[in-house]
Structure formats: C-alpha cells, structure tokens
C-alpha cells in the first residue's frame, strides 16, 4: 500500500471513529429514562409546538405563556430557560418557538409519539434526507461518486456542527437536503420544481433570500412564479391552521425579537459579522451592523450571479459563494448551521484524497496558476474541517473566541471561492451523470 493510500484510509478511519462516537454518545444520552427532565434541547420546543398545532388551541401557538405551560407537560420547569421580559413582552431567550407556522406543521406527526421516540425518528429521517440530497447533488455536479459522498456525510456528521445538530435536535440536515435539491433542480433547469423547493425553504426564512437572488438576477421568472404560487399555498395552509391573526402578526413579532438587544443570549457566539460586532461593540451595535452587512451581502451575491450569467462562469462556484456568504453575513445564523459547508464541498471537490493535488476543473488561462494553488488550500480546508472544527470547539476556550476563529475561517473560504469563481469556466455538461473516480 502506498503512503498516500495509507494516509487517506487512516483519515477516513479517524472520521468514521469520530462519527460512531458522536452517534453512540447521542444515542446513550437520549436513552436516559427521563431525558427531557434532565436536558433542554431545541427539539423540545418544536415537538411542543407540533402538539399545540394538533390541538384545539392551535391559535395560541405564539402565546409565550401558553407555550411554557405546554412545555412543562413533559419538561421540568427547572430545566427550561427562564422567562424574560423584553420591552414588556414575555419571552424566553432559547425556549420560545419563533419559527413560522409551516415549520411546526412538520412536527404534527410527532405528537402521536412519545418525545424521545419522536426525537430519534426525526433525527434519523432528517439525516437520511440530507444524505440523499448530497448524493443527488454530487451526481448532478459531476464531482464525487456515491462512496465518496457517503464518506463526505460521515465527515459532516463527525464535525462539530454535525454533533451540535444531533445534540439540539435541529432539522439542519433536512434544510441542507432542501438546499441540495434546489441546486440540483437549478443545474438541471427544472424551474417549476425548483420554485416549489424555494418556497419550502421558507421554513427557515432567514436563508431563502440568498437563494432567490440567482433566479431574480438571471430572470428565471417561471421559477419565481412557481415559488410564489407554492408560497401562497403554504400561506393559505398556515391561515387555516393557526388563524389569520397569527399569520399577519408573525413578521412584526419576529422583527421585534431580532432587533431587541439582549433578546438572543448567544449573539456573541454567532460565527458571523453580527456575532463578531456583538463581541466587540455590544448587542445593539452588532444587530445594526449585522443587518447592514446582510444587505451588502445580498448586493454582492447579486453581482456574482449577474457576472456568472453574463460571463459564462461556473454556477457551482457561484452557489458555493452564496452558501458561504450565508454563514458569514446572515444576521441570524448559529454554529450548527455551519453544516451547510458540506454543500460547498459537494459542489466543488472532485476527490477527498489528502494527496490529490490537481483538479479537473477548467480554469481561465490568466489565473490558472493562482487558481490551482488556491484550490489546494480550498480542498484541504474543507476536507479537514471535521477535525479542525472539533479542535476549535475543545481547544478554543471561550465561545466568543471559537466564533471568531470560525468567522475568520469562513471569510477565508469566501475569498478563495470568489477567486476560484473568477477563474472558472462553465461546464456545459454538468447535468450528465458522473463517473466513478
């Protein structure tokens, strides 16, 4: 066996061991007889909101005190985050279910199960859908084969964001699968279904605006019309479910919650511009700066897609820039959302080998040499991310320091992606099936 193969297999073995350890630790923890009496996780509020929607009291979905009462039916009050009063409005920093109504509709079936079994089932289903989306994306983008994509999924699960997603019961794998489906349908020019998926992505409304930009800039009106149509159907379903008043008051409620300094207790832990400015200048300045930078990022991403459309550049790199822009500039992003970086890897990497130095990507002649060197750095940063993310978590110390390190790392990835995009040439056969390599 060559040294290169030994290194690659050893690294894959390390990731597999980390993945198994993460999964076993989670399963052991979730097997405790009184799990929800001992631990507070995000899934608890999702499950509780699903039970509210399934009950006759569904129109009280966004009543904070009613949410707390329903939570205490299966979670001890001592475990829940304390109630806080912000501008005269009772809320909880982490325990308030603030997502849109159609997000909680996903959890209505969970009300038929005990909380712990619902947690296990939803975690498994979200993971499977995310992996299926990854495989579909890599096959469409002509990057990795199925075995390599499964190795990529193992690495993502073993990373700190992967462990964090499991620990909190967040549906990040599901959202990632939807993003993968949107990009696949875009690359395959299936605009109607892409519009429907874009509407479904509003279950996490802080992100879809970045993915609506490509359609707006490239004038894919059919995609946007189908997205609007599907969105109207979702809106109608929400009105029928939780009532007109809850729907029309949702946007003002969520806007106030995200503009009140001190509401989000983890502002400084966000791996974004908002988190960075909150750490150094306080929450009030951080919130304002975060929104301004998000607007500038939207304009920047619009320019990227305009140049991609007019200049014949590779849309896979444009999507990678869009994804990383979300992690750097979104005003509402948390460390578990960095799992989205695996999509950038799926779009652009053609090998997971640590010794594979070249790329089959076509580069423009003027920037060919620097693009090749930049691609090597890009590859190593993404391939080693599962290990480096764990090192940051367990060696970074304060959460602000960890967020700063992650922000700087993602900013470097963004700069590399922009350089590689500017040197890329569009692959006209991107929708053909990929061969194993």
Image (cartoon, rainbow, N blue to C red):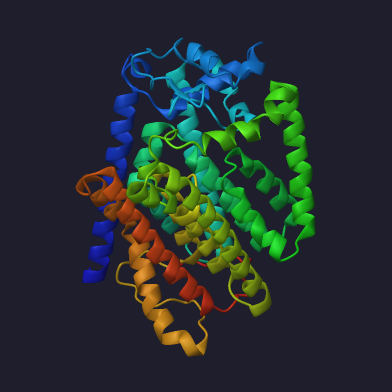
| Whether residue 146 can be seen here | no
Residue 253 appears in the rendering:
yes
Q: Position of residue 375 (x, y in %)?
A: 40, 74
Q: Depth check: 405 or 421 in front?
A: 405
Give the residue furthest to the bottom: 366
Give the total number of marks visible in the rendering.
Answer: 0
Left or right, 432 with reference to 11: right
**Direction from residue 334 to residue 160 in the image, left or right:** left
- 246 vs 367: above or below: above
- Provide residue 358's location: percent of width, then percent of height: 39, 78
Relative vertical location of residue 55 with respect to residue 278 in this rendering, above or below: above
Q: List x then y, in percent, for residue 312.
A: 64, 78
Q: Which is nearer the eye, 194 or 285?
A: 285
Q: Nearer the viewer, residue 262 or 28?
A: 262
Q: What residue do we see at 61% from left, 51% from top?
A: 181
Q: Residue at x 38, y 68 (%)?
A: 378
Quarter that holds the N terminus: bottom left
Q: Picture coordinates of residue 244 (x, y %)?
A: 74, 25
User: Where 95 sits versus 328, above or below?
Assistant: above
Quadrant the C terminus occupies: bottom left
- Asked where in the image residue 116 lies, by quadrant, the reply is top left
174 versus 95 height, above or below? below
């Amino acid at each position: 066996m060559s040294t290169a193969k030994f290194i690659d297999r050893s690294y894959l073995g390390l990731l597999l061991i980390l993945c198994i350890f993460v999964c076993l630790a989670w399963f052991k923890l979730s097997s405790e007889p009184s799990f929800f009496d001992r631990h507070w996780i995000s899934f608890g509020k999702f499950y509780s909101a699903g039970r509210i929607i399934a009950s006759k009291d569904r129109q009280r979905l966004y009543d904070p005190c009613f949410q707390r009462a329903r939570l205490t039916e299966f979670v001890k009050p001592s475990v829940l985050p304390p109630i806080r009063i912000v501008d005269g409005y009772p809320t909880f920093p982490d325990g308030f279910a603030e997502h849109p109504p159609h997000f909680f509709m996903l959890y209505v079936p969970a009300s038929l199960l005990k909380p712990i079994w619902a947690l296990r089932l939803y975690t498994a289903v979200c993971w499977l859908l995310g992996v299926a989306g990854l495989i579909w994306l890599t096959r469409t983008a002509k990057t990795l084969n199925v075995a390599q994509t499964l190795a990529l999924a193992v690495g993502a699960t073993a990373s700190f964001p992967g462990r964090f997603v499991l620990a909190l019961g967040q549906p990040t794998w599901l959202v990632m699968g939807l993003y993968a489906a949107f990009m696949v349908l875009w690359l395959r020019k299936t605009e109607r279904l892409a519009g429907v998926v874009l509407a479904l992505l509003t279950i996490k409304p802080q992100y879809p605006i970045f993915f609506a930009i490509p359609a707006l800039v490239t004038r894919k009106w059919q995609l946007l019309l189908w997205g609007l149509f599907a969105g109207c159907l979702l809106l109608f379903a929400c009105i029928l479910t939780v009532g007109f008043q809850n729907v029309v008051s949702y946007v003002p409620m969520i806007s106030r919650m995200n503009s009140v300094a001190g509401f989000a207790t983890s502002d400084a832990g966000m791996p974004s511009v908002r988190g960075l400015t909150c750490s150094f200048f306080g929450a009030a300045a951080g919130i304002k700066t975060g929104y301004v930078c998000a607007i500038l990022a939207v304009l920047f991403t619009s320019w990227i897609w305009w140049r991609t459309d007019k200049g014949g550049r590779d849309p896979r790199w444009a999507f990678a820039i869009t994804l990383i822009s979300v992690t750097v500039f979104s005003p509402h992003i948390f460390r578990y959302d960095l799992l989205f970086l695996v999509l950038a890897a799926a779009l652009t990497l053609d090998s997971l080998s640590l010794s594979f130095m070249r790329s089959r990507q076509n580069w423009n002649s003027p920037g060919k040499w620097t693009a090749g060197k930049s691609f090597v750095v890009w590859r190593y940063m993404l391939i080693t991310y599962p290990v480096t993310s764990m090192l940051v978590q367990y060696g970074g110390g304060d959460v602000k320091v960890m967020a700063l390190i992650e922000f700087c790392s993602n900013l470097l990835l963004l700069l590399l992606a922009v350089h590689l995009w500017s040197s890329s040439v569009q692959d006209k056969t991107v929708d053909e099936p990929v061969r194993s390599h």
